[in-house]
Amino acid sequence: MNWIAFLLTLKLSFITATCLLMIALPLSYFLAYSSKKWIFLLEGVVALPLVLPPTVLGFYLLAAMGSRSPFGQVYEQMIGSPLAFSFTGLVIGSILYSLPFAVQPLCNAFSEIDPRLLQQSHILGKSAWTTFWKIIFPLSYRGMVIAFLLSFAHTVGEFGVVLMIGGNIPGTTQTISIALFDQVQALDYKGASQTALILLIFSFFFLSCVYFINRKKRRWIATRR
Amino acid sequence: MQLAVDITFSDHKKAYLSAQFSIRQEKAHIAILFGPSGSGKSTLLHAVAGIATPTAGAITHRDTCWFDAKRKIALSPQARSVGLLFQDYSLFPHLTVFENIAYGLAPHVDAKATVTEWLTRFRLKGKETHFPRELSGGEQQRVALAQTLAPCPPLVLLDEPFSALDRPTRKELLREVRKWLPSNGISAMVVLHNLDDAICLGDELIVIGEGRVLQQGKPEEMAYRPASPFVAEAIGFENLLYGQVVSISEGEILLMVNSLSGSGQAGSDKNPTDPNRATLCAVGSGQIGDPYYIAIRADDILLEKERSGESSARNRLFGKVIEVTPVGLRMAVRIDCGFQLTAKITKKSLEELNLKPETPITAVIKASSIHLIPR
């Protein structure tokens, strides 16, 4: 069992899921409540990672992060080391790759809120910000937890993007799924089966959590006594 | 002038609602919006509250412009300080009764005292820690009403505020609201469907229909002088006929009746000079040939079995029963006396008169119960 790769994967997933929640919250709020006509284009872009082969996303990311791209150059001049094949690069890649897994549950949670509740809050004099914290947040809290868990689990299972932009550097960019691939390549089937089993149990645990939360009844939405 | 509304809603350039009205009284005035469902009453309230945007027009409250399509002004709901009770009252499901009522209170207000006052007023004591889901529909509606009124906004908009309440509770709440609003100097626009409630609560009635404001005036005035057949129908005249003046004498006019729904029962084949057939005597004046709508309340029609009974009533119409249908606790009797009329009687009267389809009957109507609307 490659514990270094395992811990690196947990670290990557945690950072990614946390960043994603912060990015996806305003993005989903905009997607759910905006009446702009071009919103479908943005929805399409957000959902792209669902259908795009991870290698395609990885390829474009590599091109954008590389030392020859303007973005890669600016980053390299500011930080002093290239973005490609670094942990930071991996985080950026994971965020894009798992974006729909955070945005979808949040959009669902937001659109399940009766719009009249928000209008009522506004009419009762509360700002959009207060309304968010007092009404939207508590009513979509479960969606937020699910968004976090799903993007965490999805990042753990990431392979193609990491392979393209990570470069398989142990301790820096080698995640557990890549380590598994290496173990198989090296004909280490015993180690590979251990790694695979751990990943399986781990993913199952996370998904059960998601479905448990989905089914859990809360007092105020429970049926009338 | 407290509120001046002149707005139009259009869809694909076709105006479907165009409303002009104003509330002149500066304070404590209750205007009732009256009209059939789908006539746009809720949309009007939403436009005043700032959650629906009219296509054109303007809304002015006191000296502040709330909305002006031309000048591209649209004040946010927060900036308008109104109260709105939605038609099917939406409470915050994750907040308790207490938190719901306290939601709109300003920070300096003593929430506990204010909420307790409302709990007492609306008989909700002991429910403060309940969630909306744990309440009955009527209780939810009272909580929603308390939530809307508790912050004391200068203007409240109530969309069918008593619809979920049983009759005694509705009457009680109606009295509470009737007392509370003026004593706090608050004006209200209230959508109601029940004319009795409207007359009890309102200082003024605004009848909406056919996509516009049809009539605005005192409720009693409108109940006796509807300006159009639509208003007559909206405020509960069951019988709406159409006729022409055929003779005039001493403050009374005789009208030849054609039924509005008119499928051949309008006495066209009858002798037009026969005073017992298809004519009505009403109080009024006019010229021979003047066309009128004729509105009669079902309550104002008496039914008699005797053909020859003498009374002061000017109209004695002989006909037969067509059908009998229950309406609430009473019975609606549809009769044909050259034209069709609906009368309302109690179940007991129905039994005593033994009315069935084809039973011969006399309808008695006082001339003063016949309301004429010029065409």
Image (cartoon, grey):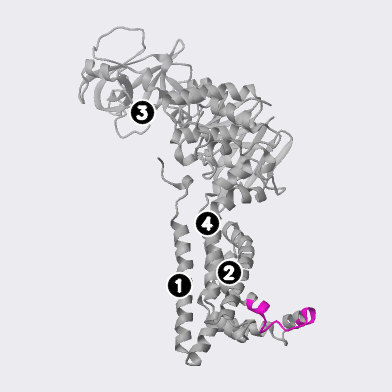
Q: Quadrant of the C terminus of chain A?
A: top left
Mark 3: few, some, or many residues within 10 Å (few <14, many ≥20)?
many
Would you name the residue on which mark 4 appears?
A: A142
Q: Is residue A83 magenta?
A: yes
Magenta-drawn segment: A76-90
Whether callout 1 and callout 3 share a subunit is answered no
Q: Residue at x 27, y 8 (%)?
A: B309
Q: Quadrant of residue B188?
A: top right
Task: Assign a secondary structure to mark 1.
Answer: helix
Whether callout 2 and callout 4 share a subunit is answered yes
Task: Assign a secondary structure to mark 3.
Answer: strand
Would you name the residue on which mark 1 appears?
A: A201
C-alpha span from label 2 to label 4? 27 Å
C-alpha span from label 1 to label 4? 23 Å
Give the foreground label among 1 and 3.
1
Q: Is residue B58 left or right of residue B35?
A: right
Q: Position of residue A209 (x, y in %)?
A: 47, 63
Q: Chain of mark 2?
A: A
Q: Which label was assigned to residue B229?
A: none
Q: Which label was assigned to residue B258?
A: 3
Would you name the residue on which mark 2 appears?
A: A41
Q: Position of residue B236 (x, y in %)?
A: 43, 27
* Residue type indicated by callout 2: Leu
Q: Nearer the viewer, residue B285 or B332?
A: B332
Give the foreground label among 2 and 1.
1
Q: Chain of mark 4?
A: A
C-alpha span from label 4 to label 3? 65 Å
Q: Chain of mark 1?
A: A
Pointers 2 and 4 in contact (C-beta within 8 Å): no
